[in-house]
Amino acid sequence: MQLATWNVNSLAVRLPQVIDWLLAHPVDVLALQETKLTDDKFPHAALAEAGYRAQWYGQKTYNGVALLTRSEATDVVRNIPGFDDELARVITATVDGVRVIGAYMPNGQAPGTDKFDYKMHWLKALRDWVREELATHPKLVLMGDYNITFDDADVWDPVLLKDTIHCTEEERYHLRALVALGLADAHRLFPQPEKSYSWWDYRDFAFRRNRGLRIDHILISEALKPLARRCVIDKPTRKNERPSDHAPVIVELDL
DNA sequence: ATGGCAGGCGCAGCCTGA
């Protein structure tokens, strides 16, 4: 079983690239973030032609998430139950016996801002909910755009970016707290290239210079950890014509 | 230190992203 996550920065713009990518990488599950589409505009027919069913949850202009799956997705939940959020950031479903949570964590703008406070509250709510889900679904994958780096190895210039957004100790605390629920960073289960990132700024030739951050993560539960076979960042896709600023991340499980 | 690029909205220029 292969699962992937990709922040596409507008599915309206990126639909051709997503379909091409699925044809070249026929994963079982693809979690999308930043679809930026209201639910009535979701391109489910085009995705069905490519062989994928879809569950989606969007809004106008910003955010928006989806799960594209080869088999049926059941027990679908949108956003975090009990957490009042007007932004469409999470979609969860059971696929082939695995509980899959696709999430677009808040950006947070900068420490000390209202958006940063929202990010902290949001991450706490997510953690409480993932804890509940893990209790009933030992086989669980939490993947998406976390907008948080684990440590300096995830940052192209940790000195320049020390304590800036995505790199603060408060954010990293929340990321480690998610892991502490009984999850593992699939990326670090395997040898990886030096300076592996999942996002590069559109500006200043950042991709060409490999000035990036690893902020898109796939966390897998303890029950799935022994079944993990591979985890790769699909860096070549960032070289696409009209690319998203994020690259897809793929995990392969022996399921 | 700042802005640079991209997308949405909507038709100029601002907001947001990361």
Image (cartoon, coloured by chain):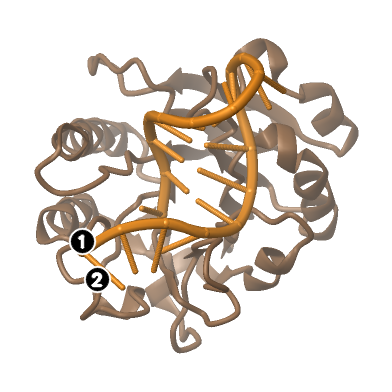
Chain colours: A brown, B orange
Q: Is residue A160 above or below residue A17?
A: below
Which residue is outermost to the right?
A49
Q: Is residue A230 above or below residue A178?
A: below
Label 1 with label 2: CB-CB less than 8 Å: yes
The residue that appears at 27% across and 57% down in the rendered structure is: A166
**Left or right relative to A69: residue A25:** right
**Secondary structure found at label 2:** loop
Which of the two residues, A108 or A78, is positioned nearer the viewer here? A108
Q: Which mark is residue A201?
A: none
Which of the two residues, A92 or A152, is positioned nearer the viewer here? A152
What's the amino acid at mark 1?
Thr
**Secondary structure found at label 1:** loop
Q: Is residue A55 above or below residue A206?
A: above
Q: Is residue A178 above or below residue A160?
A: above
Q: Position of residue A8 (x, y in %)?
A: 61, 45
Crowding around mark 2 (Cα neighbors within 10 Å: few <14, some 14 to 19, many 20+) is some
Q: Which quadrant of the view contains residue A31? A: top right
**Left or right relative to A145: residue A96:** right
**What residue is shown with label 2?**
A161
